[in-house]
Amino acid sequence: MWGQTNSSASIYQVICTPLDGTSASILNLTGSPTKWSGTSTSGDMIPQVSALVKLTTNERGRSKRGRIFLPWVNEGIADQGTLTSTRQTAMQSAWNTFISDMSTNNCPVVVASYKLASSAIVQTLFVESLLATQRLRQPR
């Protein structure tokens, strides 16, 4: 799942925020084991781009689609702004396994809308071959 990320980077905490608007967020420490760490060791990081995972649900509308931006892409797995096909295929397989395992364990992956206080179950996801940049959203 983290095939684009440098092996020196890892996720050490995850914060889960309930959509009810009142419950406190829950902090979970991962301990930074291998499964929460990057696997790429070839080349320097490209700081401007991320690998992109697109999430789709059975519901329509902007609030029912999601994206996951995976940072710290290494030069060795990128070619002219795209993930190498080998890396993209491996990441796609890992993400498919993740979404299936989460569903099997009664904890499906969802796209959450904090604005609408709702969620929709992810039916499919796709690891894009093109690398992406995240557009900053300005507060209104």
Image (cartoon, grey):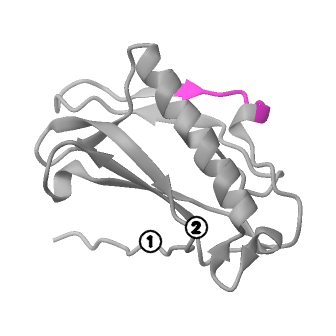
Number of numbered markers = 2
Instruction: Return the residue nearer the eye: 12 or 95.
Output: 95
Residue at image position (20%, 42%) is: 58
| Residue at the spot of label 2 | 50
The disc placed on residue 113 is none
Q: Up-down: is 76 above or below 35?
A: below
N-terminal of the two: label 2 or label 1? 2
| Helix, strand or loop at mark 1 | loop
| Residue at the spot of label 1 | 134
Q: Quadrant of the N terminus?
A: top right
Q: Position of residue 17 (x, y in %)?
A: 33, 33
Does the CB distance between marks 2 and 1 fall below 8 Å?
Answer: yes
Instruction: Return the residue nearer the eye: 86 or 65.
Output: 86
Residue at image position (38%, 32%) is: 109
Residue ranking furthest to the bottom: 80
At label 2, which amino acid type do we have? Ser
Q: Up-down: is 91 above or below 100?
A: below
- Tag 1: Cα neighbours inside 10 Å, few (<14), some, or many (≥20)? few
At label 1, which amino acid type do we have? Gln
Structural distance between the alpha carbons of marks 2 and 1:
8 Å
The stretch drawn in magenta includes residue 31 = yes
Residue at image position (31%, 49%) is: 56
Would you identify the image quadrant in which residue 4 lies?
A: bottom right
Q: Position of residue 82 (x, y in %)?
A: 63, 76
Q: Position of residue 10 (x, y in %)?
A: 72, 44
| Helix, strand or loop at mark 2 | loop
Would you identify the image quadrant in which residue 137 lies?
A: bottom left
Q: Quadrant of the C terminus?
A: bottom left
Q: Up-down: is 14 above or below 124?
A: above
Residue 32 in view? no
Instruction: Return the residue nearer the eye: 60 or 68.
Output: 60
Instruction: Report the magenta residues as a range.
Output: 28-34
